[in-house]
Amino acid sequence: MTENWDSYLCSIEGKSASILINLSLAAIAPVPEYPVLAYVSIAIQHPDENGFPTEEEEDTLTSLEDRIIAALTQGGMALCPGHCLTAGRLDIYFYRKNAEGFADQLGEALRPFPAYAWETGVHNDPDWELYSDFLHPDEGALLAMRNRSVLDNLLELGDNLSEARIIEHWTFFSSLQESEGYAAAARKRGYDVEQPAPSADEPEHWPVRLTRFDTPDKMDEESLALFTLAREFGGTYKGWACPAVLP
């Protein structure tokens, strides 16, 4: 199975949290063969002021987590949808065929880490509600993750993110009226606007293409503004793209 791991920051019960999720599972969830949700909650030994591990402990926790996931998913026994790091604890989740032997397998996997206290539990979750309702990012977080991916790709090419170039944005609407309202608002933000006709394959999708001379290092803020504006007019903001500017 192809895996697509990504992470994002959020707040849980007023505390900072970092969630790591296997986004590739969204296309197949829920998986009927794995109806049982199991977790292990591990106490971080030296959390910082945000409840996250310090840099010195992070490597140990990464090794610990890798060992647990490898042991618990071998032979197709389970799927790991992700983890949650918050309030001084690392919670790793698994969807299993059944609960049999889970605690014993964890105990064996954690044997090389006797200093870490842990607890575990299992319950039925055939609809994968933890994955869809808790781990999976909302639209705003997904946008931030896509932005990070684009920026990382540009940086890998050696791009100077503070150098201006034409950046384009795409948004889709279910009616011409909605798209025209958005287009007018975008022009007030200094964008050049194109409104291509819907394609024959998707006649219900009215596209709007925005272009403006801008810098990629401002796209987190600007794409969020366009995402919010699109929602006001009933549309779906799909993201941005630009050419790389290399030395």
Image: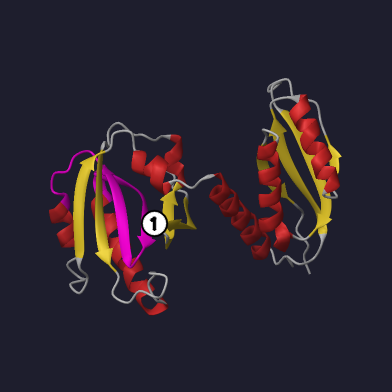
Q: Image point 35% across, 43% down: which residue? A: 130
Q: Amino acid at mark 1?
A: Glu
Placement of 135 over or under 127, stated as above or below: below
* Extreme residue in the bottom direction: 56
Quadrant containing the N terminus in the rendered view: top left
42, 234: nearer the viewer = 234
* Mark 1 Cα shell of 10 Å, populated few (<14), some (14-19), many (≥20): few
Q: Is residue 191 in view?
A: no
* Extreme residue in the front direction: 14
Q: Judge from the rendering whether residue 230 lies leftward or rightward of residue 42; answer left or right.
A: right
Picture quadrant of residue 198: top right
Total tally of numbered discs in the picture: 1
Picture quadrant of residue 208: top right
User: SS class of the residue under badge 1?
Assistant: loop
Picture quadrant of residue 152: bottom right
Residue 69 percent location from the top left of the image: 29, 55
Please provide the residue range marked out in magenta.
73-102
Q: Judge from the rendering whether residue 19 lies leftward or rightward of residue 75; answer left or right.
A: right
Q: Does the magenta-highlighted stretch encompass residue 143? A: no
Residue 47 percent location from the top left of the image: 35, 74
172, 17: nearer the viewer = 17
Residue 72 percent location from the top left of the image: 24, 52
Q: Image point 82% across, 58% down: which residue? A: 165
Q: Image point 71% across, 63% down: which residue? A: 217
Q: Is residue 31 in view?
A: yes
Q: Image point 26% across, 59% down: which residue? A: 41
Q: What residue did someone put label 1 on?
A: 13
Q: Does the magenta-highlighted stretch encompass residue 92? A: yes
